[in-house]
Each structure stands twice: as C-alpha cells, then as structure tokens.
Image (spheres, rainbow, N blue to C red):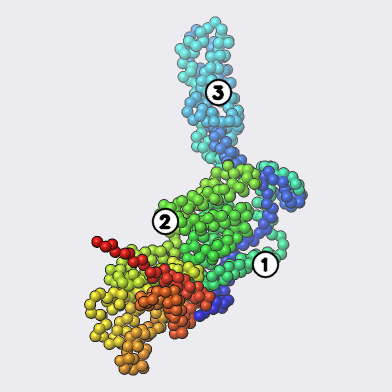
Amino acid sequence: MAKTGIPREPKIYISLFIVFLILLFMMPRTGKFNYDYKKGSPWAYETLISQIDFPILKTSEQLQAERDAAGSSIVPYYKYEDGVEQEVISGVERLNFGEHADFRPHLLNTLAGIYQRGVIADAGAVNAGASKNAEGVLFVQKDKRASKIPASDVYTVSSANARIRADLKRLFPGVKVDSVLNASGVFEEIVPNLLYDRETTDLVHAEAVDYISPTQGFVTAGQLIVAKGEIVTAEIEQMLDSYRTEYENSLGYNGPRFLMWLGNGLISLTMVLILFLSIFYTNPDIFKEMNRYIYLLFIFVLTAFAAFAVDRINPSALYMIPFSLAALYLLAFFRKRVVLPVYVISLMPLLIYAHNGIELFVLYLVSGVITMYVFQYFNMGWRQFVTALIVFGSVLVTFIGFRLINDGSSFTEYKLTLFLFLGSMLSVAGYPLIFLMEKIFGLVSNTRLQDLADPNNKLLRILAQKAPGTFQHSLQVMNLSDAAARSIDANVLLVRAGAMYHDIGKTENPQCFVENEGVGAKYHDGLTPLESAKMIINHVTDGMRLAEKYNLPTIISDFIITHHGTSCAAYFYNKYIQEGGDPANADEFFYKGKKPWTKEQTILMICDSIEAASRTLKDTSPETFDKFVESIVASKINAGQLDNADISLKELYRIKSVLKSYLGQIYHERIVYPKLDK
C-alpha cells in the first residue's frame, strides 16, 4: 500500500513557479499610500505633511452636480446683421405719418438707440435659451469676435415696440400715438438685427458640459494635510483622497527598485508557498492528478487576476465580482477541507491590490463560506437563487457593519449595494460554466457524479432490464461502499457512481452470471472450466468497451478495470485443477485488469467481494460476519491486490468495522409471524 510523501515530480513545481511569475507580474510597482482613514474618525497616524504639490480633486458628486448645472444652463449666441438697422431706418423714413410728420425725427432717434443695443426675435429657441440662462447673459458675434453682454441690455421685437410707444406718448401726450403708429405701419418695419446661432450655441453648450474642471484648489509641498488625532472631515477626506491619487500616480516608490522587486517577490512566494502547503496538508492526492492540480492553480490565478484587472479599471466594481463563484468552482471537484483554505488564499490579492482590501476580503470570505455551506442544500433549479439571496443578505449585513463602524453611510451606498446584489446573483448564474471546466480540464464534477449514479441514467436502465440480478447487486455494493467511504472520509459520490457501473459489462452476457440465472438448466452446464472462466473474465473488457461507447468518465471506468484487479476466477480454476487440468495454463483464469490505487477503488473491490460472497452465508451471527469480513480483506492483501492502494491499515480497520456492522443489519433475523388456527 502506497504512502504519501512530499511530491517529487518537477511539473508540480514548474506549475507553481509559473503561478509565482504571474503573481509577481500583477504586483503593484508603485508606492502604496499606507494610510487607512474614514470620514468622521480621528486620524490615527502622525501628523501628515504633503511631500508634493497636488491639486484637490472634486468628488464625483461635485462633478456630477456641475455637469447637471452646465447642462441646464444655456448661454445663447447671436450673429450681428450689419445692414438691418439701415434698412429699418430707410423703411421708416418712407412711411406716411399724415398730420403727425413731426413723429419721424423722434422715432428715428429712438430706433437708432434701440438698434445700437440690438434687437432679437420674440419666440422660439431664443426665449427658451434665455429662460435657461442662469447668468442672464448672451454672446453677440460681431466682426469675428464674440462679446458677452447682459441679456437685459438687448431688446426683443416686442420690447422695442413698447419702447417706441412709450417715448412718443411721453413726447406727444395729447395724441393717440397707438392709432398713428398702427396706421403708418411702423411695427411691421421692426425686425431683429441679432439672429440666433443655434449651431454655435449647441456646440459651446456641449463643450461646457463635457469639460468640467476636475480640481478645486491646490496644496503645495510642506503644507499640513491633517494633524494626529484630528477628526477627518469631508474637506480633509477630499484632500487625503487627492493626495493618495497623486502620491500613487506621480511620486510612487522612491526607494531602490531591486528592493521593490524583492518585496513583491517575497509576498508572491509566500502566497504560492501557503497554497502549496494547504494542498499538501489537506489532500496530497491532488498532486497525483495533474489535471485537478492545474485546475486548482487556474482558479487561484483567475481570482487574483480578476482582483488585479478590476481594481485597475474601476475599483468600485470589485463589489460586483462574484468571488464566491470561485468557491463553487472548487467545491465541484474538491472536498471542503481543501476548498476553504485555497479559497481564503485566493482572496489574499485583494489585500494587496485594493485600497479597501480588508473590507473586501472579509465580505468575500463571508460570501464564500456561506455559499459553500448553503449551496449543498439549495443547488437544484430555482433553489439556487435562494442561495444567492442568502449570500446577498449575509454580505449586506457585513457591508452595513463596516459602514456603521466607519461613517454611518451604509444607507446611502445604493450603488455598492446594487453591486453586491448583482455579484450574489452572478455567483449562481455563472455556476453552469462548471461543465465547460469539466471539458477543458478533463474533470468530473460532483454534480455529474450525482447524475451518473441516478438509476434513471440510460446505461443503468439497460443494466436493470438485461441483468436485474446484477443491478440489485450493484445497488447493495453501492450502499456498502457508501458506508465504508464515509468511515474514512473518502469521496462518497465517486464510489457510489463507480459501484453502479463496475459490473456494467455483464449486460453483454447476463445469463452467464449466477445472480441473473433463472430456474432450470444452468448456463455453465456443459462448458469446460476454462470456457466458463473466459466468459466470466470477459465482463471486465466488455464493461470497458461499454464505458467508451457511452462516454463514461475515466475515473468511472477505472472502477470497472480495478474491481477484480489481477485476481483469479478461483471457482473455475479449482474445478479445472480437480478435473486434471494443467497448472501451466493458470494464467487463463486470471483477470487482466489493474490493481486499485485509490481509496475509492479499494473500497469497491472489498465491498464487491463481500456482497457477492455474503450470499452463501448460512450463519448470520456477529462472529460469522467478523471472520467473514476479515477473511475477505486478508485474501485481497495476501494476493497482492492492495499493493498499489493508497490506503492505511488504520483506514482498513475502520472499513472492516463498518462492513461487519452493516452486514449484521442486512442479514438480521426476521420475526416469524404465528399462524391463526381456523
């Protein structure tokens, strides 16, 4: 029986080295702003003096407010038409005022003053633009220059007409001015000399909205930012945020470059080393299956890369990344004792990349653990969304806790709350990708193992129809193997699926096997022991052929080829010798399979032999079961069938104890019901 030690295969360490290089590449190459602060909390560090000049950045709320204000305010542009004033004056000079010809010089004087200031149209985009003009100004384009003037300084056509009436009524109080003006047609002559320029207005307005200065104020090197113990107000927080941005972008790391690389290398090496040790101490068998090992490393790197990339693009979106999906992707192929430490290590890059890494680390640690334990109960159909809601609730409570501790803003973080909700939903919505992972890495998930062990599976239905006795035998072996696997913490789902298919080859010739024989003549009557042995042994090769035909995973077909190992068809061999057969032909009576090498394959071999042989027992006392199980296991060991098995004597002892107890429950005595006398 094999022993587990430190793996020596170079490819294991080459893979780890590649992971190390990837982590090293993603490590930050600039200095990190090593202060953690929150608005409303005291500054816990020494007094901070700025080492550099930097602008104070506006908050996103301030920028949005300014954009909204710019969007709602329109400053209209007008083109000055040079010849309009002269045309209006010429037109008025030609008008007939009748007996009130003395109106003319005063009217012309008033018009000169009006057109000197400018006349605009009454309706349409002009007034609409003016109504949105919070500053009450407009621009007049004249001689290729735009002059900014108060909107109140120019006339509309209506206000120009009103000015004419007012002036003439003041000068000629006894005259019906309105009648004279209407009769002469003066008002028809008044037209705008400032024409609204929609194209220029829209262009300037769009530029004003697009370009909002991102800064307000400036801090010079040597200026105090915050004193030790001072409460971090909104203004100080804004300065600290601006300082951090400028520090990380422009100042960065100012020490020797090799020290930065050395530090990043040590951190990356530490994470890789912890990952290796977590695998080694939780399930070293992973190192023996490179596809499982590479898959685990892939999930680790994928999680780290997601944290790295999203933090570079949009740090707020880190709240939406479904990191707990990594826990599900691991849980589909590994046990919880492996998944939990690997998942925790996979979250460590968040502490390095993200500014609020501690908060994110705790949030996703909570979501991952909750997901692992809840998903096993709510993993089918719509129940998966129950898992998502439970995960969201737990993460939201944790998130609110962090916000209440810091600044009490938990109930205003609607955007981040929405991100957390979407991330929780994505953790379930992305689970079907596990089947793609199966194809890429050649793995079999727990979900697929459950499907394979379902008696409604096509190949198992064929087994039940063609070989019902073998099907019942497989069910009993599955139950025995289940109990044995649980006793040593082996993969229960795997051994159950393997048990259902280990004798699938018997469907090719079901009557050859005693459990499928009917009443009457026996199949092997008239056959030589050698012929019978070959037919019995062929069920292994037939099973492997069916496994290939129906695309059974390799880890399932391994149970077919190992459940008899290289053992002997003893019944027919002994009969062959008794009939005078040549011992030199003994090789014809041995299975051409493989000896089991995993715990699960070993369990199946033992349980298969025990279930088949137990049908011959006449005595069902505990002592009989004790001797029976001991003899079966001893025969396997003595025949060398467990030489390659990765199983300990302690585990074998537990398996034997469970099987003895299980047989006692199966073959317990029944109560004989008394018959009533008639």
Image position, residue 271 (x, y; %): 61, 65
Q: Mark 1: few, some, or many residues within 10 Å (few <14, many ≥20)? A: few
Count of numbered marks: 3
Q: Is residue 187 above or below residue 232?
A: above
Element type at mark 1: helix
Labels 1, 3: front one: 1
In the rendered image, which quarter is residue 589 located in? Answer: bottom left
Location of the C terminus (image quadrant): bottom left
- Confirm or deny contact between disc 1 and disc 2 (CB under 8 A): no
User: In the rendered image of this protein, does residue 606 appear above or below residue 203?
Assistant: below
> Which residue is tagged 3?
155
Residue plotted at (37% across, 77% down): 617
Residue nearest the observer in this picture, 108 or 578: 578
Residue hosting label 2: 380
Answer yes or no: is residue 549 visible: no
Q: Which residue reaches farthest left?
A: 520
Does any portion of residue 127 appear in the rendered image?
yes
Report the amino acid beneath label 1: Leu
Give the amino acid type for the residue marked by disc 3 in the picture: Tyr
Kindly identify which numbered label has been placed on residue 641. Answer: none
Residue identifier under label 1? 262
- Can you give x and y, in whole percent of width and height, for residue 511 in the image? 27, 76
Secondary structure state at the residue bearing disc 2:
loop
Whether residue 579 sits left or right of residue 344 in the image: it is left
Whole-angstrom CA distance, mark 1 to mark 2, is 48 Å
Residue 367 is situated, as x and y percent measured from the top left of the image, at 54, 54
